[in-house]
Every structure is written in structure tokens, then in C-alpha cells.
Image (cartoon, rainbow, N blue to C red):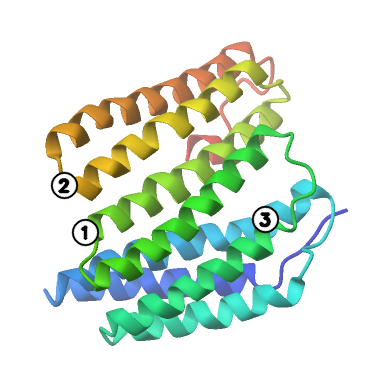
Amino acid sequence: MFYLSKVSIPFFFLAVLDLLYSLAVKSLQLEPKAIWITAVFGFIAHTIMSAMYQIVPNSQGKPLRFAWLSYAVLLLSFFASLLFYSFQWLYGSFVYAITSLLFAVNILLSVRNWQAITVKFIGLGTLYFLLASFFLLLSEFGFIPLALAVHTLTLGFMLNVVIGVELAWIPMLYMEPLNITFGKRLFYLSLFYLPIFLFGFYLLDYRLISIASLLVLAFSGYFLYILYSVFSKRRMPKEIPLVVRY
């Protein structure tokens, strides 16, 4: 079964709109906060959400459990972006938190099989996305720094989902099996290092952040090693496909 999401393309265009807006704000040297929020919680998040609405149901071989929720998430995401464009941070963050909650429910309840390492990474990333949105809301009240919300989304949501998907797609493109043990170790490493890194941002303890950054480097390096193990065993094609190069 191949599932075609009707919200993936609108989400992609919303992400491009967020990117263009953030670039315009930067070029005009307006509110710096608008750049961070629209680029990270807009462009990055909406791009990944667009992909996940396509990837998750196809990975399960079944459509989304509550397909109508995806339309509600799309509309609320657009509304949240409009609020961010007008510098309404508090209201935008509140709508964004509700949106992320509905998105997480929509995605997590659609997963029936959690055995694949890719699905585990996607599930973990979804939880971090939910956490990042609530951190964004709390930052508006001054309870936590905005940097904590930003890094929760980029390293928690973006990195976990992107790595999880690449662990499935790249071996598939080369028709080479992924070393399951390597994949599990990488997942456990993600569970370990990220809370330490984010706690450093909560405390704004730059010494702890610096130490935890070495764990981020180790995590990324191990991921690249796993990819190298796939490349080194490949029999065909000899040339690396363009999509893999990107």
C-alpha cells in the first residue's frame, strides 16, 4: 500500500513561506527573535512535519488513524505562523503548543509496529517536538531560555527524525542491510546525550554545554560511521546517487 498525504505539499509550501519570511526579517534587520522562531519552529518543523505525514503511514502500511487531524494541524500551523509573522509571540506559542499536541497524537497513534529502528527515532523525535513547543510557550513567561526550546527542536526533533529516516532509506537505495546492532546503539546514545545537552541550556551552564557538545559530536560521528559501513559494502551502484549525496 502506498499512502499519499494531502497535507504534505501544503505543509511544504508553508515551510518555504516561513523561510522566505525569516530571510526577509534578517535582511531588513528587524526583530532577531522572529528569525529564530520562523526559521526553526516554522521552516524546519513544518518541513519535517510535511515529510512525516508521508513517511509514517507508508512505514506502517496503513493510513493515518485519524486523517482529519492532519487538516486541523495544517490550519493551526498556518495560524501560528501568521501570529509569529506579526510578532504575537505568546499567542503564537500557545497555538503552536496545541498544534504540536495534535500532531503528536496523530502520529503516535498511527504507529502500530515499533520494532524498526527508524520508527523508534521518529517516535522519539515526535516527543521532543512536543516538548520543544511547550518550552517555547514557557520561554514567553521567562521560565526557561528560548535557546532551550530552539535546541530541543533542532537536536531533539530534527536530528532524530532525519537520522531515523536516513537509516532506512540509504541502505534501501544500496540494497544493503543495516547493521541492527549499530542502529540500536545509536538510538540508545540519543536517549543518553540529549537530556544532558538540554539540561545545560536550561541552566545556561556553558561548561556543561561544551562537554555535552562532545557527545553530540560522538553521536553524529557514529551515525556517519554507520553510513560508511553501508557504503563500504555496496556492490551497486558504483556511483553514489544524487539524493544520497545531498
Q: What element carries label 3?
A: helix
Q: Is residue 179 at least partly visible in the picture? A: no
From the viewer's perspective, is residue 193 above or below residue 11?
Answer: above
Spatial CA span between label 3 and label 2: 32 Å
Q: Which mark is residue 38?
A: none
Q: Which residue is labeled 1 in the image?
A: 145
Q: Earlier in the sequence, mark 3 or mark 2?
A: 3
Q: Residue 108 carries which label?
A: 3
Q: Position of residue 155 (x, y in %)?
A: 39, 44
Dot 1 and dot 2 residues touching (CB under 8 Å)? yes
Q: What element carries label 2?
A: loop
Q: Which of marks 1 and 3 is nearer the N terminus?
A: 3
From the viewer's perspective, is residue 68 above or below residue 195?
Answer: below
Identify the residue shown where x is 45% and y is 71%.
97
Q: What type is the residue that disc 1 sits on?
A: Pro
Q: How many marks?
A: 3
Q: Which residue is labeled 2 in the image?
A: 204
* Most foreground residue, 181 or 17: 181
Q: Position of residue 198 (x, y in %)?
A: 31, 44
Identify the residue shown where x is 32% and y is 26%.
215
Q: Where is residue 25 in the image (x, y as percent from the top left)?
A: 21, 75
Identify the residue shown where x is 45% and y is 80%.
95
Quarter of the figure with residue 44: bottom left
